[in-house]
Image (spheres, grey):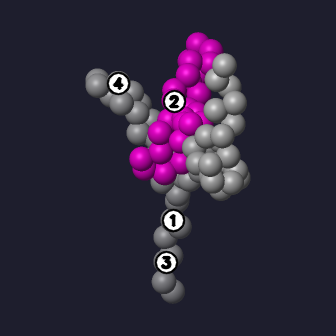
């Protein structure tokens, strides 16, 4: 009869802050939050001992070019011409 060893899930130690103030965030947590390498983030202090990691969206980059093609060609130039006294 063969003896089968039971596999135990390895428990990883909690993340720590390094001497250079760097933190390693577990990949599962990043994926669950929808964050990937290169995603701009902002860190905010929420309470003593609690940090909040927030995706730092640039609203200008997100909205630029949103209205391209809405106005006919030359319309805005004509409209601005009406502002002159």
Name the residue rendered at 54%, 48% in the picture. 35
Name the residue rendered at 51%, 65% in the picture. 7
Check disc 2 and report the residue beneath it.
42
Check disc 3 and report the residue beneath it.
3
Question: In this orientation, which residue lies closer to the viewer: 47 or 84?
Answer: 84
Task: Tell me the CA gap for discs 4 and 3.
Answer: 47 Å
From this viewpoint, is residue 70 visible?
A: yes
Nearer to us of marks 2 and 3 is 2
Secondary structure, mark 4, is loop
Q: Residues within 10 Å of mark 4 (few under 14, many from 20)?
A: few
Residue 65 lies in the magenta stretch: no
Question: In this orientation, which residue lies closer to the viewer: 34 or 7?
Answer: 34
Q: Residue furthest top?
A: 48
Closer to the N terminus: mark 1 or mark 4? 1
Check disc 4 and report the residue beneath it.
21
Question: In this orientation, which residue lies closer to the viewer: 76 or 31?
Answer: 76
Closer to the N terminus: mark 1 or mark 2? 1
Check disc 1 and report the residue beneath it.
7
């Amino acid at each position: 009869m063969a003896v089968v060893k039971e596999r135990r899930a390895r428990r990883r130690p909690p993340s720590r802050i390094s001497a250079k103030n760097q933190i390693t965030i577990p990949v599962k947590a990043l994926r669950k939050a929808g964050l990937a390498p290169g995603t701009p983030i902002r860190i905010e202090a929420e309470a003593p001992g609690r940090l909040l990691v927030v995706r730092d969206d640039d609203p200008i980059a997100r909205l630029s070019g949103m209205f391209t093609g809405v106005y006919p060609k030359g319309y805005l130039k004509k409209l601005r011409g009406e502002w002159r006294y």
